[in-house]
């Protein structure tokens, strides 16, 4: 009986598994903008086959390049340029950390566009949590609704 219950639960989890979601946290750290990207390690590995990543390059470096090419953040109309800082795996999730090259002392406007993984999976979702000075918001972005403008 136990194997039957196990098999049924696995099949149900496959059928009703979410199409994919990532979490991005944007916050201030010593006047730099920090970006923390988090995603289920197994889901991310599944998307590897659709990423242009040479076999001799570390996968997390490919993911970092992909994220930076698909997230556009502007603060007060100035594009935020990020540097990849580190990656880790925690509790089954891949976590990538980025820090802005420039410092920001005052923030009047935040604009973010996130197109991560829509080219691979149109049903993918990107949760963005913003904690920048007086802006504290959370959004669920989808293909077609992939940007936020806060003033």
Image (tube, rainbow, N blue to C red):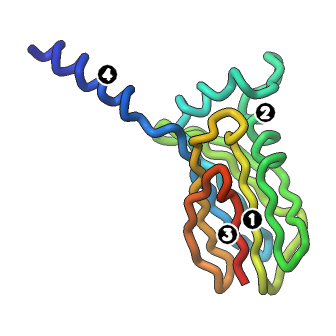
The percent position of residue 117, horizontal first and vertical second, equals 68, 40
Q: Which mark is residue 145?
A: none
- For label 2, count other residues whose C-alpha is less than 10 Å away and answer few (under 14), some (14-19) or many (20+): some
Q: Position of residue 126 (x, y in %)?
A: 60, 52
Question: In 3D space, how far apart are the residues under numbered discs 1 and 3 (Cα atoms)?
Answer: 13 Å
Contact between labelled residues 1 and 4, with CB atoms less than 8 Å apart: no
Q: In whole angstroms, how far apart are the C-alphas of marks 4 and 1?
A: 37 Å
Residue at 72% of width from left, 25% of height from top?
50
Mark 4 element type: helix
Establish if 66 lies above or below 7.
below
Residue 141: which quarter of the image?
Answer: bottom right
Q: Residues within 10 Å of mark 4 (few under 14, many from 20)?
A: few
Residue, disc 2: 62
State the separation of the CA atoms marked 2 and 1: 21 Å
Can you tell which quarter of the image residue 133 is in? Answer: bottom right
Q: Are marks 4 and 3 in contact (CB under 8 Å)?
A: no
Sequence-wise, the earlier of marks 4 and 3 is: 4
Going from N to C along the chain, the mark reached first, 3 or 2, is 3
Give how far apart the Cα atoms at labels 4 and 3 are. 39 Å
> Which residue is label 3 attached to?
27
In this rendering, the answer to whether 78 lies above or below 2 is below
Disc on res. 112: 1
What residue is disc 4 on?
11
Select label 4 or label 3 by which is in front.
4
Image quadrant in which the N terminus is located: top left
- In the displayed structure image, the side of residue 53 where residue 10 appears, left or right: left
Please rate how many residues cluster around mark 1, counting C-alpha atoms within 10 Å: few if below 14, some from 14 to 19, many from 20. some
Question: Nearer the viewer's eye, disc 4 or disc 2?
Answer: 4
Question: If you read the primary sequence from the N terminus, does the residue marked by circle 4 or circle 2 appear first?
Answer: 4
């Amino acid at each position: 009986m136990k194997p039957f219950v196990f098999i049924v639960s696995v099949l149900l989890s496959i059928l009703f598994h979410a199409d994919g979601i990532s979490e991005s946290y944007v916050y201030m750290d010593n006047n730099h903008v920090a970006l923390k990207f988090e995603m289920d390690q197994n889901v991310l590995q599944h998307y590897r086959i659709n990423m242009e990543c040479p076999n001799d390059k570390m996968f997390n470096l490919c993911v970092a390049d992909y994220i930076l090419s698909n997230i556009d953040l502007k603060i007060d109309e100035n594009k935020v340029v990020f540097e990849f800082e580190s990656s880790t795996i925690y509790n089954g999730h891949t976590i990538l950390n980025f820090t802005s090259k420039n410092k920001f002392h005052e923030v009047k406007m935040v604009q973010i566009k996130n197109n991560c993984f829509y080219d691979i999976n149109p049903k993918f979702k990107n949760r963005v949590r913003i904690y920048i000075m007086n802006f504290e918001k959370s959004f669920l972005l989808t293909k077609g609704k992939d940007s936020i403008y806060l003033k």
